[in-house]
Image: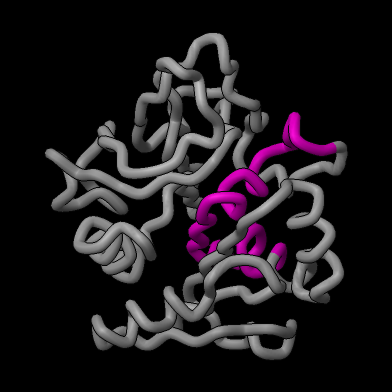
Amino acid sequence: MITIINYGLGNVQAFANLYKRLNIAARIASSAAELDGASKLILPGVGAFDHAMESFEESGMRQTVDDLVLRQGKPVLGVCVGMQMLARGSEEGTLPGLGWVDGQVRRFDANKLPPPGRLPHMGWNDVIPRNGAGLFAGLERDSRFYFLHSYYFDCASNDNILATSEYGIEFGCAVRSNNVHGVQFHPEKSHDFGIRLLKNFAEL
């Protein structure tokens, strides 16, 4: 059962609705007890890094999710700030991240952005998978996703970068470490491309 983690941040219903359209079983969990039986997890997120980490801790689900991901090896997909939470930390805040993927979240340098150097990076952008398997099966060419962010995931190892995009600099917009996956863009807002990616996650 795909389980969407509801800790108060992120449009969890949008993910549930997409999986319903795909006729794939999914549910929303708002407590540790509701995580029971999860086969895959989605960790959405919007807003500031520290607020997201605090909200996740206060939800009472952190310890159970840690166990599912780290001990039981359940696949997890972090989305937007949910991806940034996978890192060791972020320049946006002071709290430690989950540390499931080695790296730091960094703010885009406005001086390196295309004129007029606006943040956040908002709108549709090309995504270039490094491997057309897994999350990006069928998305090897001409895939575009919807972004809304001012910070990016700076992986400690290039081996953990699944896909890249460009906004002034090339940055990793999708990461993976074993059973842990993350995407900076919003698949739930990315029409057919996002639907295909979420279907791929269900089929991992």
**How does the figure colour the protein chain or chains?**
one colour
Residue positioned 80% across, 74% down in the render: 59
Q: Percent position (x, y) of residue 120?
A: 54, 36
Left or right of 136? Residue 64 is: right
Q: How many marks?
A: 0
Residue positioned 71% across, 73% down in the render: 7
Is residue 8 depicted above or below 75 in this figure? below
Which one is in front, 144 or 117? 117
Q: Is residue 67 magenta?
A: yes
Residue positioned 56% across, 10% down in the render: 111
Is residue 190 depicted above or below 9 in this figure? above
The quadrant of the picture occupied by the N terminus is bottom left
Which one is in front, 39 or 119? 119
Residue positioned 75% across, 45% down in the render: 97
Which one is in front, 132 or 22? 22
**Quarter location, residue 70:** bottom right
Q: Is residue 8 magenta?
A: no
Is residue 29 depicted above or below 160 in this figure? below
The quadrant of the picture occupied by the C terminus is bottom left
Left or right of 37? Residue 204 is: left
Q: Percent position (x, y) of residue 163?
A: 34, 35
Q: Percent position (x, y) of residue 92?
A: 75, 35
Farthest residue, direction top: 111
Which one is in front, 100 or 124? 124
Which stretch appears magenta? 66-93
Left or right of 161? Residue 69 is: right
